[in-house]
């Protein structure tokens, strides 16, 4: 169904493309008429019509560009997004010296990025630090993850259930409605975030590059 809503956005973009050719044709016709019939190089009425048509295109194109390419809704906006929380147990990885739940790869360059690798439910997940954080020790909700609307009570319940070894996956998906379809986002994932919970720092393996 989300494809149907996104067709609305495609249709509007097609209309804008057609409108560009319509403007070019109209301006050309008006100016030819002004020069040939009225024998003028300038006419106030013609210029005003030109400006109005161009302004309509600029405003419509700007609006569509913003909602299509620069859309950034708030996580709490329930008219736009659907929030989903999943809790999955981590799988312990065994090493030569010690076992660990998550591997952190640190790259020493000016981008200062990290990546996290862990196993959960028979699948290996690798995610950049932009979209994940690690909670270790007493507090299951680190400062880095507090931009995401996790429920602290649910995190503490997961602590008890999984012995502080789990991943809390937050997925925000655009709702299937005409507003999101206009921006070609209906049914698409807006963001996926991983809160990786480990009992303490000894269960984290760090690789430096």
Image (cartoon, rainbow, N blue to C red):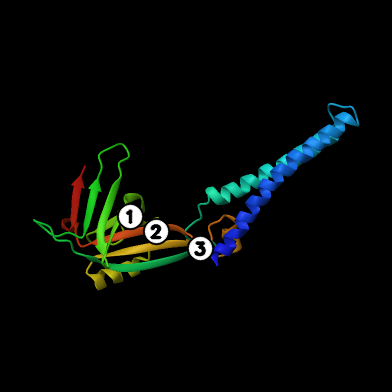
Residue on which disc 3 sits? 187
In the drawing, what numbered circle is on residue 192? 2
Q: Is there any visible trace of residue 62 in the rendered image? A: yes
Q: Is there any visible trace of residue 139 in the rendered image? A: no
Q: Earlier in the sequence, mark 2 or mark 3?
A: 3
Q: Earlier in the sequence, mark 1 or mark 2?
A: 1
Dot in front, 2 or 3: 3
Residue on which disc 1 sits? 132
Determine whether the residue tagged by mark 3 lies in a helix, strand or loop.
loop
Query: In 3D space, how far apart are the residues under numbered discs 3 and 1 (Cα atoms)?
Result: 23 Å
- Residue found at the far bottom of this picture: 161
Q: Is residue 126 above or below residue 23?
A: below
Q: Residue at x 15, y 57 (%)?
A: 202
Dot in front, 3 or 1: 3
Crowding at mark 3 (Cα within 10 Å: few <14, some 14-19, many 20+): many
Crowding at mark 2 (Cα within 10 Å: few <14, some 14-19, many 20+): some
Tell me residue 191's x, y (percent): 43, 57
């Amino acid at each position: 169904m989300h494809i149907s809503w996104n067709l609305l956005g495609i249709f509007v973009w097609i209309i804008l493309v057609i409108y560009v050719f319509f403007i070019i044709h109209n301006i050309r016709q008006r100016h030819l008429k002004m020069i040939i019939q009225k024998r003028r190089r300038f006419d106030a009425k013609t210029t005003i019509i030109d400006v109005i048509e161009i302004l309509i295109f600029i405003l419509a194109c700007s609006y569509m560009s913003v909602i299509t390419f620069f859309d950034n809704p708030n996580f709490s906006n329930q008219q736009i997004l659907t929030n989903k929380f999943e809790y999955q147990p981590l799988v312990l990885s065994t090493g030569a010296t010690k076992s660990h739940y998550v591997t952190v790869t640190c790259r020493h360059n000016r981008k200062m990025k990290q990546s996290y690798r862990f196993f959960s439910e028979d699948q290996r997940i690798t995610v950049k630090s932009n979209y994940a954080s690690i909670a270790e020790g007493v507090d299951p909700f680190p400062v880095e993850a507090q931009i995401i609307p996790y429920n602290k009570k649910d995190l503490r319940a997961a602590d008890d259930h999984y012995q502080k070894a789990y991943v809390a996956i937050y997925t925000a998906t655009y709702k299937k409605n005409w507003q999101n379809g206009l921006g070609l986002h209906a049914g698409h994932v807006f963001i996926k975030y991983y809160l990786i919970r480990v009992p303490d720092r000894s269960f984290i393996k760090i690789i430096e590059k």
